[in-house]
Image (tube, rainbow, N blue to C red):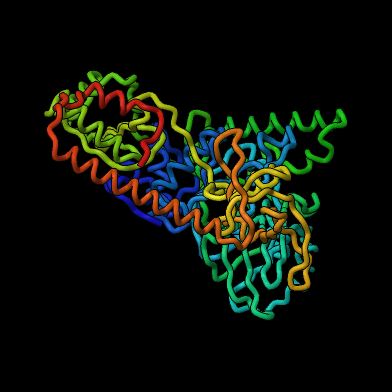
Amino acid sequence: MKKNELTDLFNDHPVLSDLTEKIKSGTETRLGAEGLYGSSKAIAIARIFLEAPFTLTAVVPEKEDAAYLYNDLVSLTGDDTVFFFPSTYKRSVLYEQTKPANIVLRTEVLNFLSSAGRKGIIVSYPESVMEKVISKKNLQKNTFTIKKGDNLSLEFLEELLREYNFERVDFVSEPGQYAIRGSIADIFSYSTDLPYRIDFFGEEIDSLRTFNTGDQLSVNTCTRITVIPNIQDISIEETNDSFTDFLPASSVIWIEDAKYIRDKINDISEQLAKKEEAGQAEGKSATVMTGNRFIEECLKFRTVETGKSGISEPGLRFVFRTESQPVFNKNFSLLGSKLVSNDDEGYRTFIISESQSQIDRLKDIFAEINPELRFESMLFNLHGGFADHDIRIAIYTDHQIFDRYHKFRIRGFSTRRESISVKELTGLNPGDYVVHIDHGIGKFGGLEKIEINGRIQEAIKLVYRNNDTLYVGIHSLHRISKYKGKEGAEPRIYKLGSGAWQKLKQRTKSKIKDIAKDLIRLYAKRMASGGYSFSPDSYLQRELEASFIYEDTP
């Protein structure tokens, strides 16, 4: 968790402070908030969460709204406290196509809520919260915890994974898979977005770590891990609970446009029932709840309703006075005029960007247009700028100033790209050239099963000169890369153990050093010689650079 300078600006906000105190007191279970625009709603949620000791769930009308709210809250409070709860499906239950990454995120949320003593923020949307979930009891029954130093046999672990319907493979690439190589077990649980690697010393757990599926390199060490199967495979009889059944009794639900959310869930439920009557989506209607039931479940908790279409009359309503960031359309004269009027009216204006180089450009532009313009800059990432008239603060985002698309990021599966990836590996054909960092260029000979230490394992076959063969274990995938050379030109392949590849690498290093020395001498001569002085960049040049849609190369 982190408090930062942006949320600290709202410490003494009169309306937000009153709302926070009223929520903390618990004297009113139905509260309303209106007048929150841009990212002001994220700041309000963050401030309440940082001050109050409970879990807060935010449900907003659309998936895209939820994703941007999630990103804002991660920026404001830290990614260890904010969780995204998506639908199991790529679109919704109507289209039935599940997404493994979403199942992982859902399982992570349920696992988090099952852990006592933790609080966090959960962000979701109608298509997700309408899906019924496994009960707490059944989740605990299907959760296995492993700690460093535990005594555990590989045979027992494999038997457990089979009961969980995990698939044994030679190397894991997606949730629900496991691999065993000697004293090492790799498990891709549905409780995390990276697989686990368990190193045994006899029957003792010697180390636990996460690793990258692309290059098989370790990411983080762990002291304990949880293994959870695909909770979507649990029978319908065991998945009849609402997501809200996992929430602690002290939780607060922040719901935006509750009536719209209720009606949207009801509409999807009705469409699903019609598909089922037509012989499609068999049994799916039993896996979702109606919008009416979801609202009933929400009203068991303290609620804060926002938006235009509420569902219940709040006991107290808190009115904020914010407005969205004006549309500037890259017009710096218009922006400059707004900065002047803000200053005249006693507002502190902040321009925020997640790029320091962008902030520097904006400062240069304004210094040349009008050095008297007053604003403060902040390295930060928010989706929507706004002005808060209660505390006279305006926060403008650079992507809105330049009318650039602002992309949200949802945590999922990560893959490093330095070495060959599993996807690239499966796309190789026998005879394609690959490069091993120690042995040089060879031809890909396919994947073969070989015996290593009495166990059959899958390995990558590389063929060198005179049909010399090298087998590379999957755990050494990071030592191989795809060959990239001049199109149409065949590379030279050396005999294994000849030392030719090492000599070639040494000669290449020597040539690079010689080129570097020549460059140093060349630049020394340039520094010593006279040159032509070009006129400095104008604000127009910097304005053009600042409007570029891509991030600067570091």
> On the picture, is 87 further left or further right than 320?
right
Residue in view at x 35 percent, y 32 percent: 385
In this orientation, which residue lies closer to the viewer: 171 or 443? 443
Front-lying residue, 10 or 211: 211
Q: Quadrant of the C terminus?
A: top left
Q: Quadrant of residue 200?
A: bottom right
Can residue 215 be seen? no
| Residue nearest the viewer, comparing 416 with 137 | 416
Q: Does residue 150 appear to the left or right of 222 in the view shown?
A: right
Asked where in the image residue 455 lies, by quadrant, the reply is bottom right
What quarter of the picture does the N terminus occupy? bottom left
Q: Position of residue 393 (x, y in %)?
A: 26, 36
Q: Position of residue 464 (x, y in %)?
A: 67, 53
Label tally: 0
**Image quarter of residue 149:** bottom right
Say whether residue 398 is visible: yes
Say whether residue 358 is left or right of residue 194.
left
Kindly identify the residue that appears in the image at 68 percent across and 73 percent down: 183
**368 and 399: which is toward the camera:** 368
Q: Position of residue 526 (x, y in %)?
A: 19, 37
Q: Is residue 96 above or below residue 455?
A: above
Q: Residue at x 71, y 58 (%)?
A: 469
